[in-house]
């Protein structure tokens, strides 16, 4: 595959996805130039915008997500939310330890303190039980 006079944003990502090298001119290609591959290239229309869709690339590690909204404000919010979701995903993949939210850690701590209170006698047990109730 050859794209001549490509002046659009993201040409580096396209080169990685198709497995190609970016060359400055195609007037005299050399044998050692690496040409990319895409099984299907098509122009699609989303709303009033035209896009070029590359399918079946050598490296299927990239994709494009098109966000659309009724106003600039809604689109900005959608983009921020999507960015936050991607950051959470990246951090989860990098560090597979997860701290559950929704009061999960507090409930587990309260259960552990309550269990401890059953092993202790006297006023100390009453104090521990009171602490466990305060955690809930």
Image: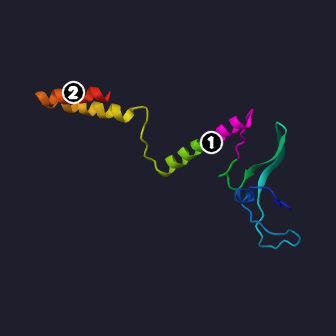
Q: Which mark is residue 63?
A: none
Asked which colour scheme the image uses, the reply is rainbow
Query: In percent of the image, x 54 and y 49: which residue is there?
Result: 90
Question: Looking at the picture, does residue 29 appear above or below residue 17?
Answer: below
Q: Is residue 10 magenta?
A: no
**What's drawn in magenta, residue-wise?**
64-81
Give x and y (percent) for residue 86.
59, 45
| Picture disc at residue 80 | 1
Q: Residue furthest right?
A: 27
For numbered disc 1, what is the local secondary structure?
Answer: helix
Residue extending furthest front?
73
Relative to 108, residue 21 above or below? below
For the N terminus, the image quarter is: bottom right
Return the residue nearer the eye: 83 or 62: 83
Is 7 or 63 nearer to us in this picture? 7
Which mark sits nearer the N-terminus, 1 or 2?
1
Left or right, 124 with reference to 4: left
Circle 1/circle 2 CB separation < 8 Å: no
* Circle 1 crowding by C-alpha within 10 Å: few under 14, some 14–19, many from 20: few
Residue 134: % across, % down:
28, 28
* Residue 129: assigned label: 2
Rendered location of residue 111, percent (x, y)? 28, 30
User: At 30% across and 30% down in the image, what residue appears?
Assistant: 135
């Amino acid at each position: 595959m050859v794209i001549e006079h490509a002046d659009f944003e993201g040409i580096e990502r396209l080169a990685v996805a198709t497995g190609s090298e970016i060359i400055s001119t195609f007037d005299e290609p050399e044998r050692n130039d690496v040409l990319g591959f895409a099984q299907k290239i098509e122009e699609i229309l989303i709303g009033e915008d035209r896009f070029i869709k590359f399918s079946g690339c050598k490296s299927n590690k990239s994709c494009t997500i098109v966000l659309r909204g009724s106003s600039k404000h809604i689109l900005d919010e959608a983009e921020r939310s999507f960015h936050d979701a991607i950051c959470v995903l990246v951090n989860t993949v990098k560090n597979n330890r997860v701290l559950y939210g929704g009061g999960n850690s507090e409930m587990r701590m309260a259960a552990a303190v309550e269990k401890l209170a059953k092993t202790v006698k006297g006023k100390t047990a009453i104090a521990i039980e009171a602490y466990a109730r305060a955690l809930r």
